[in-house]
Image: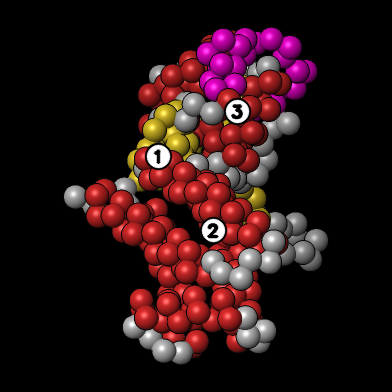
Amino acid sequence: MIDQNEPTTNDIEPSSPSIDSGLPAIKKYKANPNRKKREAKVNPEYEAAIIKIMYMFRRESLNTQSAVIEHIFNNKSFTRNECDSQISEINSHLTGYKSQWVALYDYFIDLAYEQKVQQTQTEIKSIFKKLNISTKEKLGQHFHAQLTSLTTNIDEILKQSTSTIEDDTPEVQALRDLFINGDIKANLPERRNIAYRLDIDVDYKYFGGLKGKQNSGKNRRVLEQVLIHNTHFLLEISNRKHIKFLQNLTDDFNDDLAIFNTEKSKAEKTGLERVYDSLVKYNNKLTAYKLEVSK
């Protein structure tokens, strides 16, 4: 179907009402002289591809088929951010792991202070001495400070240098292959299924004042060449090295927690010191990496 979302005209002038109608003047539209409308019959696969681009890169300025086609004629890239899904995955894992660390902390505190288990109390005294503290509340502050530092360090690493690369994901490559290897004139529908508007200077650059029927083969061939040569897809990502480092680190979190949780399931009476030390270890790794990549 022809994209009808973009107004067909911009300038409004009132028409004279009928002398005996008693009705107000009806507003009518006239074409914007600085914009050129073009229409075409194209292979429906091309129409579907343009709609897919519209939804993949949807934002306020690209919410119609006409806007997508004009974007291509203006030789502008379509850019999306891949890192959102990766960062979301890292943060989702981190949230779950932090909950497990808290559960482990609560387990050992309960053993020491509610169940009065001697082994656990002895271990906590050892931690007090190491941290130069003397109360359960101070221990809790230290423990939660380590958890907070994990989040802070990861956020700071992710905010460091981003890069933009060519988008080579399968769904984008399928669009490229269609425009490069497809046949725009195959399976033409009975009616025009593409409509778009260009600024006069842009239209002249590509069509050179080309007139004739809107659905002429010449118009369609121009559109085909523009789709082949002007359709660019870019992927904005966080530094892949950073992402990989954090993915590996969260895998290590998972491995350590699996060991700690197995010991908990066996009702082990000690282990809080190793749990706390694991948080310190990971924060030290994050801090060292952060310093390394900021040089």
Give the residue displayed 56% in from the left and 10% down from the top: 181
Given residues 232 and 251, the one toward you in this image is: 251
Instruction: Give the CA separation, mark 2 to mark 1.
Output: 19 Å
State the residue position of label 1: 240
Instruction: Give the CA separation, mark 3 to mark 1.
Output: 20 Å
Tag count: 3
Q: Amino acid at mark 1?
A: Arg
Classed neighbour count for the residue bearing mark 3: other residues with Cα under 10 Å, few (<14), some (14–19), many (≥20): few
**Which comes before the other along the chain, label 2 or label 1?**
2
Given residues 5 and 76, the one toward you in this image is: 76
**Which comes before the other along the chain, label 3 or label 1?**
3
What range is drawn magenta here? Answer: 173-194
Classed neighbour count for the residue bearing mark 1: other residues with Cα under 10 Å, few (<14), some (14–19), many (≥20): some
Query: In x, y percent, where is residue 280?
Result: 39, 64
**Res 35 visible:** yes
Query: In x, y percent, where is residue 35?
Result: 48, 37
Q: Amino acid at mark 2?
A: Leu
| Extreme-front residue of the structure | 118
